[in-house]
Image (cartoon, rainbow, N blue to C red):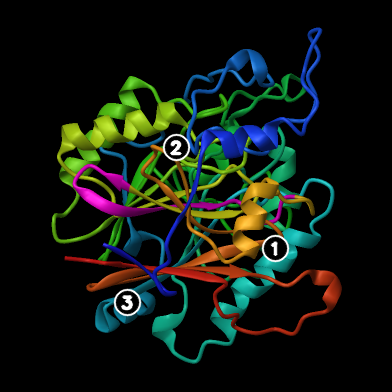
Amino acid sequence: MAKKSNAARRQTVLTQANLQAHHQSLPKSQHGHSFAPNKVPDKFHTLVDPDKNPPQPWRDLPVPPGLPPYRMNLDTIIDDATMATIRKSGKLVFHSVGDTGGVNTSTYIDGVTRFMECDFTLNANAADRPSFYYHLGDVVYYDGEGANYWPEFYEPYLQYPAPIVAIPGNHDGDVNPATGETSLQAFVRNFCSQSAVISQDNRDAPRRTMTQPNVFWTLNTPLVTIIGLYSNCPEGGQIGETQRQSFVFELKGAPASLPIILAVHHPIYSAYGSHPGSTRLKKFLEDSCTEAQRAPDVVLTGHVHDYQRFSAPLFNKKNVPFIIAGAGGYNKRLHVLGKVFQETKAANKLPVQIESEPELLENFNDSEHGYLRVTVTRKDITLDYVAVPDPSTSPKDAVLPPYDSVKVSLP
């Protein structure tokens, strides 16, 4: 059961009349033209009309480098001393965020990375230091180019002192015909290598390639099972039958004594109209959990360039956190939610519910880049969103307190 760090509040229910009042203030698309997308969705999840979105077609997945089941153990990528600390303390800490590629400038990804590094260098207690970084996709922009891995990945994380694992986002899977590379070719080269080597996309960073068994895969740790899915390129995400069967198999096969965290790039729920939540992925997740007779305890997503935290029922769980952590460094401009959400938050009337829908928007931050600091123990999972100061303010190094926090109590 998820518990909020702040006192329980009565939710604000938005009716369709509330939402339509916002829509009516905007010019209407007509005569075949369309303009800015509507920031306010009719629901927190929707079926995306492909005719109204830029073409991002389904891309066939590459041949898996590993053999099924696609699993990797944490002790194969971190050192013995760190594993011993995790086992002795009964605590696992890791970073997570997505949408990091700094297209126009590396200023903001550098700003986020700087404070992630402080969680290592300024933490006196070894058990409180992160063991790895789980990237939620869109490592590079815009079309998965290998040439962008140096300026958008290897260089910004030059001083990051832990392993980085990842699931792909839509921009990692998109294709630039001018490069001659196929979908996810560069992602596989850098994250799903047969062995840890210096990538051809690297220049002089010491970081070697990651050795994940596939683009969708499971990370086994002593305290939590993390299942990563690839939701492909179309807006709203799309997952094929082979991956669906693998996901059900992983849900069934995960240790019953450990919680499950699900990571997938496209969000199931979102309050940002131009990157809405996905009814298609919602049904996929609900059907898969019913078939497996088990549901994840936490769902981590990206794609939307901000932070949003929802709670919603899933299978036999009443209050699962669904988190968007997509403010990892892409550009300066984040995805700002509509006025109705801004006013509700300013009046301290969160969480928000859209009438007849069970999910709640518990909190959000659409003005600051940041990252998740996830702490897992035998008793609970704590998810802290750390908002970082704008680099132009010349902030001092520090272990930052969380902007938002939610705790999931474990049985």
Are the residues at dot 3 and dot 1 in contact (C-beta closer than 8 Å)?
Answer: no
- Amino acid type of the residue tagged 1 in the rendering: Glu
Which quadrant of the view contains residue 38?
A: top right
Position of residue 9 in the picture relative to residue 121 (left or right): left
Q: Check disc 3 and report its element: helix, strand or loop.
A: strand
Nearest to the observer: residue 146 or residue 393: 393
Q: Which residues are magenta?
A: 313-330
Question: What predominant SS class does the magenta segment belong to?
Answer: strand
Question: Which quadrant is home to the N terminus?
Answer: bottom left
Q: Would you name the residue on which mark 3 appears?
A: 91
Q: CA distance from mark 1 to mark 2?
A: 29 Å
Q: CA distance from mark 3 to mark 1?
A: 28 Å
Question: Which quadrant is home to the C terminus?
Answer: bottom left
Q: Residue at x 48, y 43 (%)?
A: 167
Q: Would you name the residue on which mark 2 appears?
A: 215
Residue 243 locus on image (x, y percent): 34, 28
- Amino acid type of the residue tagged 2 in the rendering: Val
- Amino acid type of the residue tagged 3 in the rendering: Lys
